[in-house]
Amino acid sequence: MHTSTALSRIAPSQTGAMTDRAIALREAGRDVISLSVGEPDFATPAHVVAAAKAALDAGDTRYTAVGGTARLKQAAVLHFARDLGIATQASQVLITAGGKQAIFNALMATVSEGDEVIVPSPWWVSYPEIVRFAGGSVVPLITHAKDNFRFTAADLEAQIGPRTLWVLINSPGNPTGACYPAETLLAIGDVLRRHPRVMVMSDDIYAPIRYGGGAHATLANLCPDLADRILTVSGVSKSHAMTGFRIGVSTGPEWLIKGMEAVQSHSTSNPCSISQAAAVAALEGPQDFLLDWRERFRARRDMVVRAINAIPGLATPVPDGAFYCMVDAAPLMDRFEHDDGKLALHLLEHGVALVPASAFGGRDGFRISFAADDARLEEALRRIAKALA
């Protein structure tokens, strides 16, 4: 059998693989707590579910425009202005089947063989795989726990070369929870002005889940003169517990949005009509529930950080946002032949599903998702401590 060279450049998602393994063990009767997937455990807000039901009752089950309904594009314009401080218009918005599709579309529409994409590491698992699938080369930009997993403007400039096409910024970040403050982004903007070929993909999907004060900082708001080469990706999956609805929203220059829509027109066509109706309700409806969700996530974060740092051989910084901790287990790795995949399997055998740091371009550790209820988190942390004692 023959597969494409593009397919040979990528590997399956290890987060998905670990989740699948946990499901299989549960189906076999094992008690496994999964902290491997980035999915809020809260119920989708009632007004969003009601909007989906109303769309079904109204027979809203036909094709929409490839790039999304006019109503959802206007709701996205509201979202970008209200929540991210980005002034945009409907012609600069694309609706996709999740934020991941927006990233895929953008890289497929722009990356050619030999182009380089700078990806901060630890990274979300799909970033480098999509770059490679598109034919580009991944240039890792290594970050460290001592710096709260943030790179500086100088770090970025040192990695830019003549073939650099994109730099990816994920804030708050998966898998580290790192948030970039405004002063760092402004300095990054100064670097970009010296390199006019370089575009920026700003993945702000976790923006509503920040634990510091003040407004969310994002490059398109802080450096509007660079707007013609910034794509900002957002959505409702994380903020509104709508992972299964598969709706992402992105905004950028019209030339890029048109290219992304052309890719979409020959892959999935329009996102689900029912999901788009639900996303309108999510973006236009009440947002006050986010305050409660954020505080509950904060309490879980603090519990996980305290428990992990109390286990001999483990350490984690306090994440600024999202619902992940990147845990360092370097002092224990002799026991696992310096293979954090073996560490993750050891913990899985003790009833906790996690993802090894190597899946994210890191090493000697694992990622915990604390998007799980308090009781399950507490039990999982007890199992981790026991497994490593």
Image: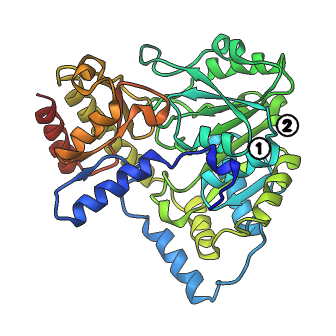
What amino acid is labelled 1 in the image?
Ala
Q: Which residue in the structure is indicated by mark 2? A: 228
Q: Where residue 232 appears, x then y in whole percent?
A: 69, 42
Total marks shown come to: 2
Q: Where residue 89 appears, x then y in whole percent?
A: 81, 52
Query: Helix or strand or loop: what does disc 2 sit on?
Result: helix
Quadrant of the image occupied by residue 166:
top right
**Can residue 38 be seen in the rendering of this structure?**
no
Query: Helix or strand or loop: what does disc 1 sit on?
Result: loop
Q: Please say if 124 is above or below 306.
A: below
Q: Nearer the viewer, mark 1 or mark 2?
A: 2
Q: Please say if 209 is above or below 176.
A: below
Quadrant of the image occupied by residue 127:
top right
Q: Where residue 388 appears, x then y in whole percent?
A: 15, 30
Q: Where residue 288 appears, x then y in whole percent?
A: 46, 53
Q: Please say if 51 is above or below 240.
A: below
| Disc assigned to residue 5 | none
Residue under the point 62% across and 23% down: 182
Residue 56 in the figure: left or right of residue 383: right
Q: Which residue in the structure is indicated by mark 1? A: 87
What amino acid is labelled 2 in the image?
Asp
Image quadrant in which the N terminus is located: bottom right
